Amino acid sequence: MLRTVNATPEPDETQPLAGVVPLRAIQRTQRSEQVRRQIEEAIKVGGFQPGDKLPSERELVETFGVSRVSVREAIRSLEALGLVRVEHGRGAFVNDRRSGLGEQMARWLQLHRDEVLELHRVRGALDELAAQSAAERQDVAAIEALVEAHEKLRAAVDADEPLEELVRLDIDFHVGLAEASGNRLLYDLLYDLHTYLAESRRYVYSTSSRPPRSVDEHEEIVHAVIANDPHRARAAANRHIVSIRELVISGLARRRSSAPNA
Ligand SMILES: [Zn+2]
């Protein structure tokens, strides 16, 4: 079920757009993505049941023939998607996803209300900085990867793909923006924040008007980054974050008798 990931992809495995993006910029992401997809598939077809422990990091490194970093990234994105939970010192366990997702998400948001709002604030500030830095830096390869991530999300929204896929592609876009900033610390911080915010993101994306709006807001960020306009990029990222935060706050307010002050 779990196959080795080719260190050098066969030509027919190469994505059509990969040709225009230097390999160096996307290689690691592709490997961790292939690892993630295989484990995700194994969970979906029941190869791993809820509560099962995934093979250890070392075993996965051997099975897939990829680096420890790629395995870690794959596990982190599985965790961000809510498919597994990582227990410190024990390993990664498959989550039980049989209970109603909507209810589960709403409950999670409610329980973590204050943390979610605080995390959104921090994430917003970092996202704005990432957008500004990406526009300043003009890393052509990273910007191409960002455009690709943006187009993938747009295509998925147009094709009305499942929530989990939209959430994953949205995270990819924001991680791409952080990468284009060229700031390693910023990238790491945002990566972690996206993991913490996966549940609230799932909630946000489950409201029907949100995915197309996010795509439009992302497009403004992308245009400003391409246009080498740091000020506009920061402002566009701010608008995106504010509109998401308002949605989260209104979702929280609907579930409470007293609405929180926005
Ligand atoms: Zn977004």
Image: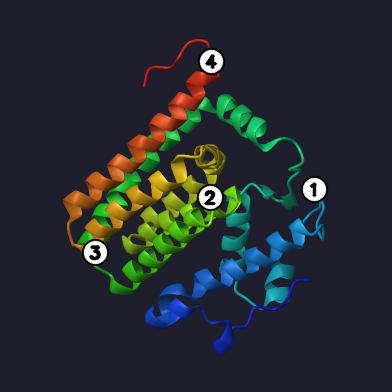
Q: Looking at mark 2, is its residue's CB closer than 8 Å to ligand 1?
A: no
Name the element at disc 1. Answer: loop
Please indicate, yes or no, whether residue 90 appears anywhere in the rendered image: no
Q: Is residue 66 left or right of residue 193?
A: right
Amino acid carrying label 4: it is Arg
Asked if the residue at tag 2 contacts the one at tag 1, i.e. Cβ–Cβ closer than 8 Å, the answer is: no
Q: Which residue is mark 2?
A: 167
Q: Which residue is mark 4?
A: 256
Question: Image height check: is 123 above or below 172?
Answer: above
Amino acid carrying label 1: it is Pro
Closer to viewer: mark 1 or mark 2: 2
Residue 2 or 101: which is nearer the viewer? 101
Q: CA distance from mark 1 to mark 4?
A: 31 Å
Relative image position of residue 119 (x, y in whole percent): 44, 36
- The single residue placed furthest to the bottom in the displayed view is 11
Q: CA distance from mark 4 to mark 2?
A: 26 Å
Q: CA distance from mark 1 to mark 3?
A: 43 Å
Q: Which residue is mark 3?
A: 226
Relative image position of residue 221 (x, y in whole percent): 29, 53
Closer to viewer: mark 1 or mark 4: 4
Amino acid carrying label 3: it is Ile
Q: Which residue is mark 1?
A: 50
Asked if the residue at tag 2 contacts the one at tag 4, i.e. Cβ–Cβ closer than 8 Å, the answer is: no
When asked about the image quadrant of residue 34, the answer is: bottom right
